[in-house]
Image (spheres, rainbow, N blue to C red):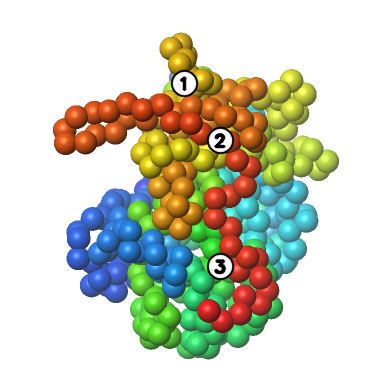
Amino acid sequence: MTIVQGPVREAVPQGPLKTPFYPRVEKLDTVNQWHEWKGYSSPDALYCGDLEYFAIRNGTGVFDLSPMTKYRITGPDALDYLNRLVTRDMAKVKRGRVAYAVWCDDQGQVIDDGTIFHLQEGEYRLCCQERHFAWFQAATIGFDVSVVHETEEIAGLAVQGPTSYSVLRTMGVEGLEELKPFGLIHVDFQGSEMMVSRTGFTADLGYELWIDPGKALQLWDALFEAGKDYKIRAIGTHALELARIEAGYLAPYAEFLPCDETIRTGRSRSPLELGLEWLVDFKKPNFNGRRALAEEKRNGSTWRLVKLDIEGNKIADSSYIFSNPKAKGDSIGFVTSAAWSPVCKQNIALGTVLVPHGKPGDTVWVEVYYQREMHWNRAMAKATVVDKPFWFPPRRGATPPGPY
């Protein structure tokens, strides 16, 4: 008897491993709050999550994103391969541009989302949260393309906030004044090539720096020397998460569960259910999940992602959503991410509700539980569905951003 073995799941390094920037980050740690990110040690906070958040909104916050999973995709069929893999038309993403994208299974359910950097003709880098090497390799059948896992070969920093442009200009980075959102440039840093992309996870002015790990510490030192008069601070995941919710950005295991991780049906989501219909291009040739998504578009979706402006100041973390305050039956959905926004002075949340609920302007009710002095309290809070990010300052899209 012959046993046919399927693709082996990509191995996650057994850690905790240290990123190239770890020696600098570890020296700043005062609270010893760390978590494991794909085998690497990553800080939740370094001194105070709230103060680190204000570095993003008032100065420059620096986050070590080296553990982000990275794949290099090259070859004569690289474009055709990506167009089959993801739902958006990658032919529209020119060289020197970055695209946000999602990829699905044959049922049109989201496996993951990420960013795709068009580096050169026939050369791309895909960055995402999860590891998908087996899936990406299986998808190469029939294409003249190479997919290489290069996470350990690229060190990365997110440099985010209103003074980030000034910091990088002071450090000597040239060409930023012409760099538009989702653009990228290659510059020289102490004899090595550094890629600078105008991307980020904060809905603010910001950049991401990508460099050889051997130059990581020199880059950190130069960056913080340039930013000493611009309120530059290292930040952890808690600060970035708050900025992410204000931006209305999706996160795996929060707004959606990768469909290859689900056990029960109905627990995954399609791009249409996540508000990402703009990423699904039915005009291009066949792509993974196209038939299922076309059927969903004709017949309608089951779920809808919503942004909620909630009354009061009690955070609606993991709360149920109802159609009216006296509802005693089944809920219409639930909150996926929630926070009090210091900069917006709003109680905000992202959630998922059953269609036809959740159209912009609709009023829903959120069941909030909160604890005070060891006693749990319940409140029904009124919420309004909004259709814009909670935080989107003009400087985010300004080119050039100008000094701050």
| Residue located beneath label 3 in the image | 205
> Around disc 3, counting alpha carbons within 10 Å, would you say few (fewer than 14), some (14 to 19), or many (20 or more)?
many
Measuring from the top left, give residue 157's x and y in whole percent. 45, 68
Q: Residue at coordinates 47% horizontally, 43% vertically from top-left? A: 348
Q: Nearer the viewer, residue 300 or 328?
A: 328
Mark sitting earlier along the chain (1/3)? 3
In this rendering, position of residue 36 left or right of residue 264: left
Write the residue at 83% across / 41% down: 283
- 1 or 3: mark nearer the eye: 1
- Mark 1 belongs to which amino acid? Pro
Whole-percent x, y for residue 108 in the image: 64, 30
In the image, 243 versus 258, the foreground residue is 243
Horizontal side of residue 173 vs 275, given as left or right: left
Residue at left offset 41%, top offset 26%:
380
Q: Secondary structure at mark 1?
A: loop
Say if residue 272 shows up in the picture.
yes
CA gap, disc 2 and disc 3: 27 Å
Distance between mark 1 and mark 3 Cα atoms: 39 Å
Residue for badge 2: 384
| Image height of 351 relative to 64, above or below | above
Which residue in the structure is indicated by mark 1? 325
Identity, as a three-letter code, of the amino acid under mark 2: Thr
**Residue farthest along the left direction in this orientation:** 374
